[in-house]
Structures are given as structure tokens and as C-alpha cells.
Amino acid sequence: MSISKTYQPQEAEAKWYNYWLTNGFFKSLPDEREPYTIVIPPPNVTGVLHMGHMLNNTIQDVLIRRARMQGKNACWVPGTDHASIATEAKVVALLKEQGISKKDLTRDEFLKHAWVWKEKYGGIILEQLKKLGASCDWDRTRFTMEDDLSDAVIDTFIHLYKKGWIYRGVRMVNWDPQGKTAVSDEEVIRKEVNQKLYYINYPVVGEEAHVTIATTRPETIMADAAVFVNPNDERYLHLHGKSVYIPLVNREIPIKTDEYVTMDFGTGCLKVTPAHDLNDYELGQKHGLQVIDILNDDGSLNDLAQILVGEDRFAARKKIAVLLQEAGVLEKVEEYKSQVGFSERTDAVIEPRLSMQWFCKMDQMAKPALADVLNGDVKLIPEKFVNTYRHWMENVQDWCISRQLWWGQRIPAWYLPNGKFVVAKTAEEALEEAKQLSPDNAQLTIADLRQEEDVVDTWFSSWLWPISVFNGFKNPDGADINYYYPTNDLVTAPEILFFWVARMIMAGHEFRGQKPFTNVYLTGIVRDKLGRKMSKSLGNSPDPLALIEKFSADGVRVGILLSSPAGNDLMFDDSYCEQGRNFANKVLNAFRLLKGWEVDESLENTNQVAIDWFASRFNEALKEIEENFSQYRLSEALMATYKLVWDDFCAWYLEMIKPAYQQPIDSATYKATITFFEDVLKLLHPFMPFITEELWHDEIFGMRNERDCCIVAKMPVVGQINPQVLIEVEAVKQIISGIRNIRNSKQISPKEVLQLSLKANSAVNYTAYLPMVIKLGNIGTIDFVNEQVSGAASFMVLTDEFYIPLAENIDPVAETERLQKEMEYLNGFLKSVNAKLGNERFMQNAKPDIIENEQKKRADAEAKLKLIQDSLTALAG
């Protein structure tokens, strides 16, 4: 086929994506090839594509496309997470719009609504990923609540319970009063908020005195169990062992001492409310204090509060401040900033709350997962995250795995009439378990059992993801799990390094006896150009699909990768996508240039030097690109590819070989260039899949069959590199740049033919390169001289001196000024190089090649300074 003059990205993207899909290029089945496997971090079914997804999935697609082109059996498994809290909130909100309340529905009725919602909206984000070019094996798409994966979750729960690693107990958890469920630490977003610090006077029992306590939460004073002071605080020594009354409710509580109390915060007196603060709870446990929970699960005050019963906690805060003021015990109120936790799913302020929950012990499972990372079996990229990982894993806490929701895998625990419970997969199995517990249970029926209402935490399904997507629980010896597991690379965000990545490693060891993946590429956070994290509330997050529409998928992929070194936050701006689009246009224009050339079979090849140079330069760049990929420096790999294509191929090679206007090109040069361009397209394909596939099928590359596509073209391998050719052509490029700089500084037209004199001091044999210099520099003749040419503009390359006679054009004053500025710059540069070479520490620690490079810089600078001095002398003479 032939590429039209007006390349339309949207049309090409739709055409080639459908072609790849239809022809099964994304599909993978076990075979004799080396597998390369990635499992997608499953996005929530509630989600739509945002910039974080764009970054994460572009990186995965680059890796999977490259592996496919290396001849590996590339398998990228897509899927979605059921997202218990977020999805339930969406369904509740939708029902509310229809005039239906969740509390009026049975569990089964609610779940029917939830499944309808999921089927309608749950696949949106995966469809959007296709617009980006994600080459997932869509036939393998999984969902964390499909039957097989849910069975895996339930079987896992039972397995860990029987090992004694899952238990039920009352603990302090993060409570979401809007979602009415416990949430994980990962689902709590810390925000700095403006609050008020209330100074409240607590009367001392039996004395005409009081202690003043500062708190941001006056609505919880009714749950106070004690007042604490530091035992070393001399201000309160006389109060040790005494008691105070809680204002408004007049309940007596003791004054106790503990070094936990900070003397210089607030008044140095701390009210302790064990039911409503994690630190207070631990202090209460230490001192055996009463626990009084005054909040309902929706955040309103209950009967134990005695006052303001039924009021929302924040409304109660305002009202109790008024009551304290009226009672004369509110000493003052100050403005105060502090960090407050918000639910990621509902944006409600998190309430620390004592709650009966299910927990999973983590200490034993953490050991092999920590060892994997410390011994390098699982590599974190970049390595700076290893210390964070180690800290988490060495201080691991038991995992609260229960959620007070209906959407999710229901915990397989069954309660007996006497309050005891058994854990089993079905009610029938539970009944048999119950009967074995005690002879008293012999008459029980299924109707006597009540299943646990809670579901498991969503992470409790996603930690099984690398195993469950290959049916490793249902069919542990199946072809898929044995071939694809362990997977190769995981691409994810650092904030879920513990909550998901570490737990997957734990599950891998517990259920497969080995790690689930080898490399973990941790992306940075996508920020705007002001450094702010992108968010809907700030309105600074662009619509990814709108970016694709404007700049093309290839342009957006290049743009986001150019700005994204592993593990570092990236400052995103539309200009990066514009740069990506411009790069695509550069490739397209290079193609059109080749397409427009006429080939003459009778012409002799006069471009062998250029061909030899680009062959070496391509292999040199390919070696650098391969090294960057091996170290997961994708941004650097793209930049090396970008420079090879834009600078070396387009700006230099094509100019070196380009025939004169309306003149043909010789066949040998044309064939070599077509081969080079094919290799360039292969290198570009993982980054820019659409335009490369489009150009790959043009007729200038010959006839291709329907399977001969760029997506499966064999990736080039590093060939021979001729260092001497690279050095010599680099010198030629500097000569041409020197000529062009003189033209620019002297305002000489590029069309004006100039003369060039060369005083050769180096060992470079310029004879083979003179035609290239003449052509690209628009030079008439080149003279070899033994002396400096007076009245000429000059420059130096290596140790060779170049002169362009400009007697008629030169302005001695301006030229003297220019040379003096260049001398000033070179003197400064030479001073810094000499300082480095004169630094004993540098000379002892630097590698020999670095020292040699610095010495070369010094020699070059000294030679250039001598040439400038000679030129200044000639101008003055």
C-alpha cells in the first residue's frame, strides 16, 4: 500500500489497533519460546483513564512490545479490581437517585443492582486503554470477583485460618463513617487542614482548681478515661494521684503520669480517649483504662455520650463549644493546622474506632518477602525504595481484612446460636464443622447458622492476582501457571509497594513456593508544571483522551515517557506531548523525503562513507538503548532513540546522502537507506506503535504479507561498531557546524559558496570526507596549508585549524570582540578543568577514562586558546 500525503493519526490508530486485534497479535498461548509476562495492576471498575494510568500502561506496553519483537512469547494480562468501597458507594448513590435506599434492600437485591452497574460501567477504563495502544491479551481479561477468582479468595481465607494466621478480634481501625466500613491505611489520604484548638478547664476534684487541656476534638470529652501529665513536669507534681471532672457530664476520671506526654505541646496535659484515638487506645491498654465508645457507625453521637445524642460529630463539635463557653470552662480557642485522614473512596474524615474485625497475621509471611528484596531475587527499581520496603516489612502489623460492605467476597465464617463460629466454604460444610465441635450441636440445621455479613478487603483478592489470573488455585499444575509464572516485570506506583507488591510476594511464597515476579518498576507521581499532584479538585489533570485526540497516541506516549525517570515524580505539561507529536512528524517527513527520491540503477555509489558511518552510529546508539533497557531507564532509552532518529538520521545522514534538487539517487545508497529506515521503525515501534506500523506497510519496503507487521518484526541486534569512523565523522560534523556558525555570525547566505583552508595537525585522514564537507558546508575548494591564514575567520576541530577567508566581509573590531569573548569563556572552562585535575581526591577516586577525558578537555582548550591568540595577533597586526 501507499501512505497518503496527509497522515491522519486517529484513522491510523483505529485501523491498526483493529488489525492487530483481528489478526491475534496480542494473543499468547504457552509454547516452546521464552515467556515474557506482565500482569496489569488492575484498575478499579469505577475508574476512568487518568494520567497515572497513562504513564503506568505506556511503560507496560513499551516493555511488552519490545519483548514481542525480541521473539519472546509476550503475554500481558489485563483486568479490573472490584473495588469494594468505591463501587458500593457508586451503586448506593445511583440507587438514591432512583429513590431507593440500601437499607430497604436485601443483600441479594443490592448485589443484583451492583452487578448491573458493573456490567454497564466496569469496562470503560479497559476500552480507554485500547486508545493508548495497550497490546494486552484481551481474551485473558480477568475480574477480581469472577467465580474462579472469588473461589481462590475464599480458599485462601480458609487455608490461612486453618494455619492459625487469620483470627477475629477487637482492634482500633480506620473507620469511614460515610462508607460505614473499616478501610486500610492505603485508603486514607492525609491532608493538612485548618482546625481549632480548644482549651478546656477540667475542675480538680475536691479543690478550687482546674487543669487546662487543649484538644481539637471537644465532642469526644464525654469518652475521656483519664488525664495524663508527664511525670517530670514540675507544674503538675502536686496533681499526681488526684482526679478531675469532665466538664458538662461531671464524670470523675483520674490524673495519671506517663512519659509519652509531651510537656511543651498545648498545656502539657493530655486527655485520653481510648475509643477514639489510636495512641490513646494504646495508652489506655497500658494503664487499664475504661473504653467508652460514644460514636455510632455513621459518626453521630450515641447514648453513651449523654449529651447531643444523635448529632453528627462535626455539628456536635460546634454545639459543644457553645455549651463549654456557657458553662465558663472554655478558656480560649486558637487556630491550628494539622494532618487529618480522609477516606480515599468517600472523602469522609476517618474516625479511629475500636471494632470487631477479622485480621491476618503477617509476621511469618513477611520473612521470605523481605528476603527476596534484600537478596535481589525481586529487584525494586529504583533501588532507593529498598530501605522503605525493609522498614515496612520489619515493622509489619497484622492486616485488618474485613470490610463492612456487601460488594465483595463474603467471609466464609458461620455463626452458631451460642455465638461461636466455624470457617468453611459452604453452609453444608459449616454445618458438618459445627457438629464436630460439640455433641450439643448434633441437632443443628443450616437454618440455625448465620453467615458473617462482612466481605474481605479488596487487597485480599488482588494480592493473589499473579497466581489467580493464570488459574493457579483452580488448576495449580495447569499449563498456564507453570509456563507464565513467575511473571517478569511489574509496573506500579510506590504508594502501594507494601499494600499490594509486598503482599503479592508473600502470597507467591505461601501458595506457589516462589516469588511472583522478578522486577518491580516503580513509577513516579504525575504532577503539573507547578509541582502539584494532579487531581480533580485542583482541576489540573488533563483528560488523557483529549490529549490523544489533540497530539495522537504516539505523541502522548512519547511525551509522557520523555518526562518520567523511574521512581521520580514527573512534571507534566502539554508541551511534552507537543514534542512527541513533532517527533512523529519528523519521522513522517523523513519518510516522505525517501518516498520522493527517484532511483537510478546506473549511478555509482558515492555515499559509502556516510553509509558506513550511520551503520556504526546506529549500532552505537542501539548498544546504549539496550543498556538503558537492561537497567529499566526507559526515559533514557527513548531519548537515545530520539537523538539517533532526529539528529543522526534526519539532520545528518539524510543530508549527507540527499541528491541535488530533482536529481536521482544511486541504487546502493537508496537500498542501504531503506534498510536503515526499517531498523529505525523497529526501534521506534515500542514507543510509537501506530505511525511505525503505518509506514512499515508502504510499498517502498516491498510487498509484505498480512503477518509481516512491525509489531512482530525482529528487533535489531547490536552489530559492528567502527570507533575510528565515528570519531572522524564527528570531526566532520564539527567542521560543518563551524562553517555554519561563521555564516550565521557574519550573516553570509547559505547559498554563497565559501573557500576553506585546513591546517592539519591531527592524524585524521580528511581525504575521504572532503566531498561531505564540500556538500554540507557549500564549500568551493578546500586548500591544505602549513601556516595560519591571515584575515580569515577560524575555528578548531580536534587539533586541526580551519580558516575561511573573509577579507571583504570581516569587521576587525567585531571579530576581535568575538574572539575575546570566546577566549574569556575558554579561560574559565580551562580553570575549572585544571581545578578538577589538581584535586588530589578526584585524581585518586575517578576512573581512568574520566581522568583521560578531563585531560583531553584541557588539551583541546589550550589548543583553541592558542589559535584564538594567533588570530587576535593577526587582526592587530
Image: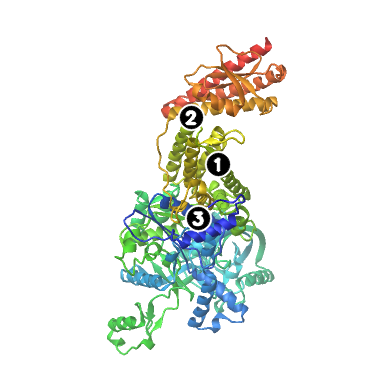
Above or below — where is 172 with respect to 309?
above
Secondary structure type for disc 1: helix
| Quarter placement of the C terminus | top right
Q: What distance separates the C-alpha of mark 3 from that of mark 2?
A: 42 Å
Mark in front: 2 vs 1: 1
* Relative image position of residue 375 (x, y in whole percent): 34, 49
Q: Nearer the viewer, residue 789 or 755?
A: 755
- The numbered disc on residue 594 is 1
Q: What is the secondary structure assignment of the residue under circle 2?
A: helix
Bin the neighbour count of mark 2 within 10 Å (Cα to Cα): few under 14, some 14-19, many 20 and up: some
* Residue 235 drawn above or below residue 605: below
Amino acid at pointer 1: Leu
Q: Earlier in the sequence, mark 1 or mark 3?
A: 3
Residue 738 location (% of width, % of height): 60, 25
Quadrant housing residue 11: bottom right
Residue occupying the point 43% across, 64% down: 286
Q: Which residue: 56% across, 77% down?
A: 302
Considering only order in the chain, which callout, 1 or 2, is on the residue closer to the N terminus?
Answer: 1
Circle number at residue 56: 3
**Dot 3 crowding, Cα within 10 Å, few <14, some 14–19, many 20+:** many
Task: Give amino acid for label 2.
Answer: Val
**Nearest-to-viewer mark from 3 and 2:** 2
Of callouts 3 and 2, the N-terminal one: 3
In the image, which is nearer the foreground, mark 1 or mark 3? 1
User: Which residue in the protein does label 2 denote?
Assistant: 609
Query: Dividing the picture into quarters, in which one does residue 195 lie?
Result: bottom right
Q: In the picture shown, does residue 162 fall above or below 563?
A: below
Q: Residue placed farthest to the top in the image?
A: 877
